[in-house]
Image (cartoon, rainbow, N blue to C red):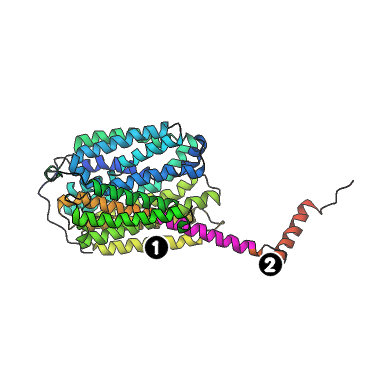
């Protein structure tokens, strides 16, 4: 990855870039938080709406599907309708649908509201990143991406903590209702400080790439269902999972062909991937998404089911991870441009690997510090990875291409998160089945180790309850 940057842009916003950053960090944080805050409330939602736990998972899946479809098309949609108008519309849709999610009297209505909510929130990440990169001069983009990282890295870490606290102390609809005041404040700031650059108005497409949008929706929608339901349906041993996977791959190939050679105004300009920095950065941020979501998905389950931690105590174990990222990101943002970005990224992966390696020693006798310290290392590593990758990936792109590129970039990170959760869940369940089979195979009176352990346990219990006596007639 080269660290060469473009000269300062000709257009600069009228308002202070940090006021612009404040205006867009709020909706970004709100949207990313909603991808994880609902996870700890699923059992409460299922019980309240008379649904099974399996049916309740569609509350998550429906949001992710509509979110993934809108993500890469955000650049085209902002050119079509105007970036400020489109951004305010997305925040308004997300906020209003949050109210209907909390007010939903049945699971089907909740799922429909989540689809609308995901569609409204899908464009918030790429739009926010594009606006930040355009508002700050190249030499200050490291700090801009550090601010952006507060939403996309820390929010999914804090989501389960906040969701657990709200669910334990109030009711599950408040998981959605908290978006309403945040959305209203965000709309005020966007109206006050955000403006459209001139090239957004000049680049308005004259036609709608309906074929490209349909192919993209089919590709990403079916892929998300496969990743979310694959393990539950035993992957390719399920006929409908196999059909959906083949459909997704075919739609992806046709979509790429259509966008590159046939679409007059492609909804996603894939030619931006010809830039080496952007292509490598997109691949790396997908990897960051895999490790971020994969390592964070099993630890809450272990702490709550095996150690008996409450949702709030589990959140306390993960809060230092977000706190470490919060403290490290401004430092890394200031170092970008002074230190080779490749060294920062390598240091980030190294710190994250050390933290992950320490987590391999988790057992039923650990203390809370055994989880906190590795998570702090991972938090520092995430900051070192995310900020320089974001800056360098966009460093050689022309200003008018940043909006389209941000959609592809954020889609890569989100898909990486879905893949990471799917892989780690599959490995966990399959390994659990293997361990269970091995345990059952040895739990027989004919196994010497088992017979000896059973005898010792029986003798120990007899000292407390006495010898068993035959019942008297």
Task: Work out whether residue 93 or residue 195 is closer to the camera in this orientation and state it.
Answer: 93
- Screen quadrant of the N terminus: bottom left
- The reply to whether residue 228 is in sight is yes
The residue lying at 46 percent from left, 62 percent from top is 358
User: Is residue 215 positioned above or below 84 on the image?
Assistant: below
Q: Residue furthest right?
A: 473
Main SS class of the magenta portion in the image? helix
Task: Work out whether residue 119 or residue 4 is closer to the camera in this orientation and state it.
Answer: 119
User: Is residue 59 positioned above or below 428 on the image?
Assistant: above
Please identify the quarter of the rendering in which residue 276 is found. bottom left
Look at mark 1 in the image and give the residue it sits on: 353
Magenta part of the chain:
420-440
Q: Is residue 249 left or right of residue 169?
A: left
Task: Work out whether residue 272 or residue 136 is closer to the camera in this orientation and state it.
Answer: 272
Query: Residue 36: within the magenta?
Result: no
Expressed as whole percent of the image width and height from the top left, the position of residue 380 reads: 35, 56
Expressed as whole percent of the image width and height from the top left, the position of residue 111 reads: 41, 39
Count residues near mark 2 (Cα–Cα under 10 Å), then give few for <14, some for 14-19, many for 20+. few
- The reply to whether residue 37 is in sight is no
Please identify the quarter of the rendering in which residue 202 is found. top left
Secondary structure beneath dot 1 equals: helix
Please identify the quarter of the rendering in which residue 95 is found. top left
Total of numbered circles in the picture? 2
Query: Residue 433: within the magenta?
Result: yes
Expressed as whole percent of the image width and height from the top left, the position of residue 385 reads: 31, 58
Look at mark 2 in the image and give the residue it sits on: 449
Residue 364 bears which disc, if any? none
Count residues near mark 1 (Cα–Cα under 10 Å), then give few for <14, some for 14-19, many for 20+. some
């Amino acid at each position: 990855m080269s660290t060469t940057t473009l000269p300062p842009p000709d257009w600069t916003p009228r308002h202070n870039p940090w006021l612009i950053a404040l205006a867009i960090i709020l909706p970004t944080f709100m949207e990313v938080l909603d991808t994880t805050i609902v996870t700890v409330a699923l059992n409460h939602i299922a019980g309240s709406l008379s649904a099974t736990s399996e049916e309740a998972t569609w509350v998550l899946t429906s949001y992710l599907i509509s979110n993934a479809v809108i993500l890469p098309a955000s650049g085209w949609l902002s050119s079509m309708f105007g970036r400020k108008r489109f951004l305010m519309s997305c925040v308004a849709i997300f906020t209003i649908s949050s109210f209907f999610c909390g007010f939903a009297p049945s699971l089907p209505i909740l799922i429909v509201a989540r689809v609308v909510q995901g569609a409204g929130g899908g464009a918030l990440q790429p739009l926010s990143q594009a606006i930040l990169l355009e508002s700050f001069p190249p030499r200050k983009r490291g700090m801009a991406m550090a601010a952006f990282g507060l939403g996309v890295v820390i929010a999914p870490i804090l989501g389960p903590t906040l969701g657990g606290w709200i669910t334990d102390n109030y009711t599950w609809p408040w998981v959605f209702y908290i978006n309403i005041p945040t959305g209203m404040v965000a709309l005020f700031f966007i109206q006050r400080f955000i403006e459209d650059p001139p090239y957004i108005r000049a680049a308005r497409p004259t036609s709608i790439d309906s074929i490209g949008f349909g192919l993209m929706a089919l590709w990403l929608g079916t892929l998300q269902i496969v990743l979310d339901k694959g393990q539950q349906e035993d992957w390719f041993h399920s006929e409908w999972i196999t059909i959906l996977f083949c459909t997704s791959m075919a739609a992806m190939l046709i979509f790429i062909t259509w966008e590159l050679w046939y679409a007059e105004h492609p909804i996603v300009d894939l030619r931006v991937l010809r830039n080496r920095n952007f292509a490598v950065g997109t691949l790396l941020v997908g990897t960051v998404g895999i490790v971020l979501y994969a390592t964070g998905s099993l630890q809450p389950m272990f702490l709550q089911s095996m150690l008996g931690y409450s949702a709030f105590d589990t959140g306390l174990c993960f809060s230092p991870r977000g706190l470490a990222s919060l403290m490290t990101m401004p430092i890394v943002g200031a170092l970008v441009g002074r230190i080779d970005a490749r060294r920062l990224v390598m240091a980030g992966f190294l710190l994250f690997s050390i933290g992950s390696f320490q987590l391999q020693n988790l057992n039923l006798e650990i203390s809370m510090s055994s989880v906190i310290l590795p998570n702090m290392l991972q938090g520092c590593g995430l900051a070192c990875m995310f900020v320089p990758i974001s800056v360098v990936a966009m460093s050689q792109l022309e200003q008018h291409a940043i909006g389209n590129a941000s959609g592809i970039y954020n889609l890569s990170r989100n898909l990486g998160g879905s893949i990471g959760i799917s892989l780690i869940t599959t490995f966990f369940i399959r390994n659990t089945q293997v361990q269970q089979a091995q345990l059952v195979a040895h739990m027989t009176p004919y196994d010497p180790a088992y017979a000896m352990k059973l005898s010792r346990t029986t003798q120990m219990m007899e000292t407390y309850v006495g010898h068993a006596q035959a019942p008297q007639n």
